[in-house]
Image (cartoon, rainbow, N blue to C red):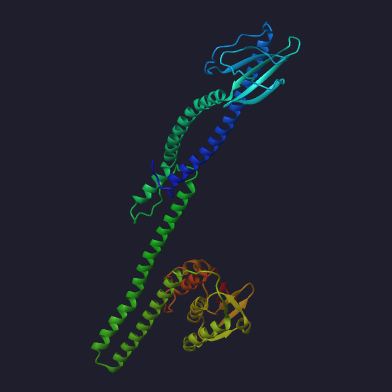
């Protein structure tokens, strides 16, 4: 029956034992006081009845002969009959030679030698006698102590039995928890299916549901990781294969123009691979980011200046104009500057790549801390918007180079900061990507 107090088993037993001991101690104290009071009341009533019974006897009021040596006191009651003149008329064997009480009617206590007496005195004025009946309190104490001991021993035995039964009951009550722990311990790390415990106790049902939910999320996260790795590997194979092919062409080319063209394609493939790797790293970093405390306030002016400077070469190559609303530059938002720059940078880059050549990409600020990026391209049909939020998904029929990660990166960064990304159609055509922080 040894269990560490830091275990649930030990704590429950200690709590049950403490409550039981507290209740038992209170009940024992109340029983002791109540029993003692009742026993003393019964003994006092016995003194009264004995005194009245002796007073009713026809005892002549005459002098008595000198008694022999008094025997040791071995009776529970002692009785004396005194005349009102103060003469000892009669007494019980073993009673003291001196009066048990002072003579006043009623109860009194008196020390005679080394003995403590409780006495009831009955005065019969008509017969001229005074009857004194007394208890030696040491005898009374032994009687009460014996009675209490007789009650205490069975109570202690019952308490020990109760402790054993409590321990067994706690052990039995915690068996479902033990089975749950063993079931989790026996599972393989690769087994992420629900625990399958349908009839769990009410107290364990939330734990089982939480564990099943966690296992489901872990299974989904592992599947997403596998899909991510598979898609990333697939996406990387294309530029790497192109690199190898163009390298072979450049190595074998006998024509300078063919060699130059192959080298240009190599540079293009390297740029595409570099962008893909950069996006993969950004996505992994945002999904693994842990934020402590409230985010800092970030000035939009600094972030927009950085994005404009970064995206201008791509915009110039497509003849696209970047138009930043003046009101945005004076605003601050509660988000890390790096996270906001990552999200806005990917959305602006997507708008430039998929917008109309020679068109305009506008960055505007709306109400309720909303930042909108709007292009004048063909837009995204409503039935394809949810699909294009997923990784490595690209628009049907598009010939724009890319990896299909821009929207996923922007949404992951904003979602981790407590924001959201909304896609809607622009008027008269184009797409609006709105970030709400």
Residue 168 percent coordinates (x, y): 42, 37
Residue 135 visible in the shown view: yes
Residue 360 visible in the shown view: no
Describe residue 349's horizontal placement relative to residue 125 as left or right. Answer: left
Residue 434 percent coordinates (x, y): 57, 73
Q: In which quarter of the image is residue 108?
A: top right
Quadrant containing the C terminus in the rendered view: bottom right
Residue at figure coordinates x 36%, y 47% from the top left: 182
Q: Quadrant of residue 175?
A: top left
Residue at figure coordinates x 44%, y 56% from the top left: 214
Q: Is residue 272 above or below residue 129?
A: below
**Furthest-bottom residue in this view:** 256
**Furthest-right residue in this view:** 126
Q: Which of 339 and 411 is in front in this view?
A: 339
**Furthest-front residue in this view:** 66
Residue 220 percent coordinates (x, y): 42, 60
Quadrant containing the N terminus in the rendered view: top left
Q: In this view, does 437 lie above or below 142?
A: below
Q: In this view, does 366 lie above or below 11?
A: below
Q: Nearer the viewer, residue 81 or 368?
A: 81
Q: Nearer the viewer, residue 201 or 277?
A: 201
Residue at figure coordinates x 42%, y 55% from the top left: 215
Callout count: 0
Describe residue 364's horizontal placement relative to residue 11 as left or right. Answer: right
Residue 427 percent coordinates (x, y): 60, 76
Describe residue 392's horizontal placement relative to residue 26 as left or right. Answer: left
């Amino acid at each position: 029956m040894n269990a560490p107090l830091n275990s649930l088993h030990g704590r429950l037993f200690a709590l049950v034992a403490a409550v039981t001991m507290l209740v038992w101690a209170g009940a024992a104290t109340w029983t002791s006081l109540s029993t003692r009071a009742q026993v003393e009341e019964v003994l006092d009533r016995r003194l009264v009845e004995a005194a009245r019974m002796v007073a009713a006897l026809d005892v002549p009021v005459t002098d008595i002969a000198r008694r022999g040596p008094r025997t040791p006191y071995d009776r529970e009651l002692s009785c004396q009959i005194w005349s009102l003149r103060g003469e000892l008329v009669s007494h019980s064997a073993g009673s003291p030679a001196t009066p048990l009480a002072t003579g006043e009617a009623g109860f009194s206590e008196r020390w005679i030698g080394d003995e403590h007496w409780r006495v009831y005195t009955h005065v019969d004025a008509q017969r001229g006698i005074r009857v004194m009946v007394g208890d030696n309190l040491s005898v009374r104490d032994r009687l009460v102590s014996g009675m209490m001991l007789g009650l205490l021993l069975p109570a202690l035995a019952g308490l020990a039995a109760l402790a054993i039964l409590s321990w067994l009951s706690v052990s039995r009550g915690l068996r479902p928890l033990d089975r749950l722990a063993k079931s989790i311990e026996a599972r393989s790390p690769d087994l992420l299916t629900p625990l399958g415990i349908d009839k769990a106790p009410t107290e364990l049902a939330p734990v089982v549901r939480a564990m099943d939910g966690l296992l489901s999320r872990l299974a989904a996260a592992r599947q997403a990781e596998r899909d991510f790795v598979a898609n990333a590997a697939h996406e990387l194979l294309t530029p790497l294969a192109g690199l190898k092919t163009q390298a072979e062409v450049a190595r074998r080319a006998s024509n300078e123009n063919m060699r130059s063209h192959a080298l240009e394609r190599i540079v293009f493939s390297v740029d595409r691979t570099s962008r893909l790797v950069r996006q993969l790293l950004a996505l992994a970093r945002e999904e693994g980011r842990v934020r402590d405390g409230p985010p800092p306030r970030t000035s939009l002016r600094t972030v927009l200046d950085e994005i404009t400077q970064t995206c201008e070469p791509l915009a110039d190559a497509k003849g696209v104009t970047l138009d930043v609303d003046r009101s945005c530059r004076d605003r601050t938002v509660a988000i890390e500057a790096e996270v906001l720059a990552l999200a806005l940078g990917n959305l602006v880059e997507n708008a430039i790549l998929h917008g109309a050549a020679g068109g305009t990409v506008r960055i505007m600020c709306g109400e309720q801390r909303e930042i909108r990026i709007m292009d004048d391209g063909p837009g995204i049909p409503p039935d394809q918007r949810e699909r294009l939020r997923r990784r490595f998904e690209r628009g049907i029929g598009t010939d724009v180079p890319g990896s299909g990660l821009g929207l996923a990166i922007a949404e992951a960064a904003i979602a981790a900061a407590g924001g959201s990304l909304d896609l809607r159609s622009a008027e008269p055509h184009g797409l609006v990507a709105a970030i709400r922080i």
